[in-house]
Amino acid sequence: MADPTIPILDMRAVSKTFTAGGRRTEALREANLTVSRGEFVCLLGASGCGKSTLLRVAAGFEAPTAGQALMWGKPIAGPGPSRGMVFQDYGLFPWLTVRDNIGFGPKARGRPAAEIRDIAERYIALVGLQSFADAYPHQLSGGMKQRVAIARVLANEAEVVLMDEPFGALDAMTRERLQDELLDLWSRTGLTILFVTHAIEEAIFLADRIVMMSPGPGRIETIHPVALPRRRDVSSPAFNDLRRMLAAQLHSHHAPRAAA
Amino acid sequence: MSTGVEAGVLPATAPASVPRRAGLGLGHLRRLALACVLPALLVAVWQVTTAGRPYSLIPPPAEVWAELRDLAIGGVNDDAFSGTLWTHLAASLSRVYGGFALAAAAALPLGLLIGRVPLIRALLDPALQVLRPVPVTAWLPLAMILFGLGPRSAFFLVFLGAFYPILVNTVFGVRSVEPRLFEAAAMLGCTGPAQFVRVVLPAALPSIFTGLRLGLGFAWVVIVVGEMTGVQTGLGAIIMEARQLSRTEIVICGMAVIGVAGFVSDWLVMQLGRRLLAWSPNHG
């Protein structure tokens, strides 16, 4: 299916303007980004920089006002199973058990019941929730809910996983653990991940490339490849150099606003 | 990947069943005793104010109890009413549940569509809202013209009484589904009309159940009015007939039976809801 010379995701001069109550807000201006298969790309920036908008365009939830959003060279027409989304607020179906949440996608696509069961079991095991397979979302902790959200996207054979500040609502310990688990999953499955965050350290820890975005209007400022070997040591000098550089860049986005 | 067992999570096995089982002992008895306080007081006041007064318009409890037994199994008065309770109860039950089922069958799909499809909302909602404040009793004359004297009018009035609570709560439930869930469904491959069954209906179910409970309650409320349309059987009919004959003890029996029947049917709906809504932290 995939021609290796074509990028899995290709954003060409994507702009997005929202109109609400007669007021126009330019959320994203001419964003250009290509993502290759198997890449882990982080979109980093302060609030209002358009990083979530770019992600939602890639998901197909928003159509670009101008420009083109392509997957495997074809325009993205709407949301679909090939691009799974992991939301910060989980978006689990509260009336379904962990097993049925994970089986939702295969079931929606009309897979036979026995196959759905097998798929669900496999991905429950993958995220280590065997003893919670029959629990409902309200009985789970935040970290477990996010594991279910990731599993349900993978169970649906997503090629690209789009993650919108997925660990933003979790406590620090759970967040670090899930970052490790996600990297482990990514290295084993060859997934392509587009990951939105406002945490510099998280971006450096996870990404092959960091896309730095800036607000007013939202746009892509620079793209930083992260060449550090994995698993990355957050206390290493190289890690800290990169963090300092990105922090200075991020803070420069705030400065003109604070002065104004 | 790690095992994923974290602190601070609830046990995964149905947590609601634990306190319920513990409550079967003393707590259960206590609740039953507390529930009986008010009825006992009312009966006591009733007894004191009516017993031993030959000209009391309201018969004392003992007389009503005797009448109730006569209505149920006969052998006390041996008049036209003796042993007829079950016929009347069955007639009312069939109208209440028939009208209610018809109301649910109409209000549920309508509510789903009005809640979800803007065109249908714009088309139907204003007219339905104008008709909503019209009391069921006001429909009585028109119902008798449209459906004639008899059970069909009763059926129609019960239908009307149950229709609006179900409709209004269904629309509310549909409108308050979290938009995120539609996005989640869409990116998992569930789009368009399939979302009605896979997302809208289950997400709105708690509200829908509230509507069904209220609707069934209203069905029992309007059954007396509905059976004023000249039907021969039914708890409403027996109350109207007894009223004309000044048999107040039968009127009270009819009231008591409606109360108990309505209570039992509400309890059944609640049990069903508890089963279907076990996932919801606010139910189950």
Image: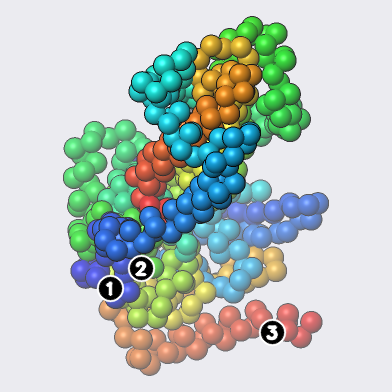
Q: Chain of mark 2?
A: A
Q: Position of residue A114 (x, y in %)?
A: 19, 37
* Same chain check for tags 3 and 1: no
Residue at image coords 64%, 19%: B244
Label 1 Cα crowd, 10 Å radius (few <14 / some 14-19 / many 20+): few
Q: CA distance from mark 1 to mark 2?
A: 8 Å
In screen coordinates, is B217 left or right of A142?
Answer: right
Contact between labelled residues 1 and 3, with CB atoms less than 8 Å apart: no
Q: CA distance from mark 2 to mark 3?
A: 38 Å
The residue that mark 1 highlights is: B6
Residue at image coords 53%, 30%: B249
For residue B63, the mark is none
Is residue A121 visible in the rendered image? The answer is yes
Mark 2 element type: loop
The residue that mark 3 highlights is: A255
Q: State which quadrant residue B72 falls in.
A: top left
Dot 1 amino acid type: Glu
Which one is in front, B127 or B275? B275
Number of numbered discs present? 3
Quarter of the image containing the C terminus of chain A? bottom right
The residue that mark 2 highlights is: A141
Contact between labelled residues 2 and 1, with CB atoms less than 8 Å apart: yes
Residue at image coords 66%, 81%: A254
